[in-house]
Image (spheres, grey):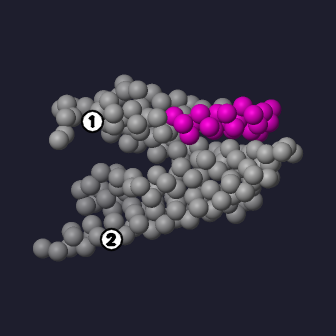
Amino acid sequence: MNSEVPGTEDRIWTVPNALSLARLLGVPVFLWLVLGPKADGWAVALLMLAGFSDWLDGKIARAWNQTSRLGRLLDPLADRLYILATLLGLALRDIIPWWLALVIPLRDVMLLGIPPILRRLGYGPALPVHFLGKAATANLLYSFPLLFLAHHDTWYADPARIVGWSLAIWGVGLYWWSGVLYWVQVRQLLKGAKTP
């Protein structure tokens, strides 16, 4: 049963949107912490807070019926910007190799052709995010703080490295696989549009 109030999709001022906006505002702060004072503890704390708020805004949106069009744009935008900022910061600090910093954004480049096709077919600007994409993003967002921690000379560096790289590799695989599935969905939409 859908209890959504008419017009709620156009809401701007919701708790989930505020959390997504706060995450967006944290991106330049994170980059400054990593590349400026190299305050890794604060950078890791900000990454962990961003990951928690990503989970929390989805929970609140569903529980309080505060889903909105803006939220469906802000949430993945914040995720992608955090991923890009983290990849850039970690690569510039030589914490991760450049191939990892490039292979993830290349997947997003692969998807650039989808929005024009969807608009031409009369759909929204993007396909709904599916579970595989969310799982990939979660793996990547959890791997980055661990890769940061693995870079320090402490007792937890080795466990952080093992778990962090495991999550990163799974995240990259799932991220690319979800990209392939988006193109499969578009192909099915194109087939459906051609059938009389």
Quadrant containing the C terminus is bottom left
Counting the numbered discs, the total is 2
| Within-10-Å neighbours for mark 1: few <14, some 14–19, many 20+ | some
| Above or below: residue 174 compared with residue 124 | below
Secondary structure, mark 2, is helix
Q: Residue sitting at 76 percent across and 44 percent down?
A: 149
Can you tell which quarter of the image residue 68 is in?
top left
Residue 143 in the image, given as x and y percentages of width and height: 64, 50
Numbered mark located on residue 187 in the image = 2
Secondary element type, mark 1: helix
Q: Residue at x 49, y 66 (%)?
A: 177
Residue 117 versus residue 74: which sits nearer the camera?
74
Q: Is residue 146 above or below residue 5?
A: below
Q: Which residues are magenta?
A: 30-53
Residue 32 visible somewhere in the drawing: no
* Disc with the residue nearer the chain's start (2 vs 1): 1
Q: Residue furthest right?
A: 153
Q: 41 left or right of 108?
A: right
The magenta stretch spans residue 47: yes
Give amino acid for label 1.
Answer: Glu
Residue at position x 39%, y 52% from top?
Answer: 129
Res. 111 in view? yes
Q: Identify the residue position indicated by label 1 in the image.
A: 9
Residue 30: numbered disc? none
Front residue of 77 and 2: 2
Amino acid at dot 2? Arg
By secondary structure, the bulk of the magenta-drawn segment is best described as helix
Measured as percent of width and height from the top left, residue 114 is found at 39, 61
Indicate yes or no whether the magenta region holds residue 119: no
Residue 180 percent coordinates (x, y): 45, 68
Who's the residue at 26% across and 55% down the image?
123
Circles 2, 1 touching at the beta carbon (< 8 Å) = no
